Image (spheres, rainbow, N blue to C red):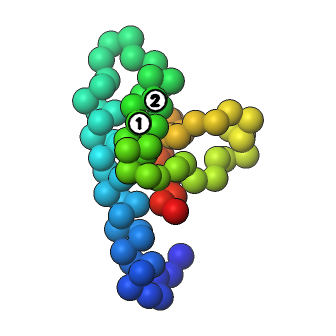
């Protein structure tokens, strides 16, 4: 991906802020017994509040609507801001 205009840079920076906020909110919500669905709901709330929506889902998860893809190593937050 290359950034060619100031508008593209600003859009990526805005998306980055939403991602950072959603990761912080999920981190705060984690406790023993927290499910990945609960963490996804936390991220979805942050996205809605920011007017963002999740980006394209990976093929293996395309049949389920969710905001984040949570893996063993770290969550991957996909975001698009219209």
> What whole-number distance in Å separates the C-alpha atoms at marks 1 and 2?
6 Å
Image height of 18 relative to 70, above or below: below
Instruction: Determine whether label 1 and label 2 are within 8 Å by CB.
Output: yes
Residue at mark 1: 45
In percent of the image, x 58 and y 36: which residue is there?
A: 66
Comparing 3 with 14, the one in front is: 14
Q: Is residue 42 visible?
A: yes
Disc 2 is placed on an element classified as helix
Q: Position of residue 80 (x, y in %)?
A: 51, 58
Q: Position of residue 46 (x, y in %)?
A: 37, 41
Q: Residues within 10 Å of mark 2 (few under 14, many from 20)?
A: some
Which quarter of the picture shows residue 47? Answer: top left
In percent of the image, x 63 and y 53: which residue is there?
A: 56
Image height of 74 relative to 14, above or below: above
Disc 1 is placed on an element classified as helix
In percent of the image, x 25 and y 30: which residue is there?
A: 28
Instruction: Answer left or right for 79 relative to 50.
Output: right
In percent of the image, x 36 and y 74: which residue is there?
A: 10
Residue at mark 2: 41
């Amino acid at each position: 991906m290359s950034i060619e205009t100031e508008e593209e840079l600003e859009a990526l920076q805005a998306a980055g802020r939403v991602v950072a906020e959603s990761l912080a909110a999920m981190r705060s919500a984690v406790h023993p017994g927290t499910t990945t669905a609960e963490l996804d709901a936390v991220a979805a709330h942050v996205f809605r509040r920011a007017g963002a929506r999740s980006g394209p889902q990976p093929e293996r998860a395309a049949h389920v609507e969710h905001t984040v893809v949570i893996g063993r190593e770290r969550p991957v937050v996909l975001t698009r801001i219209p």
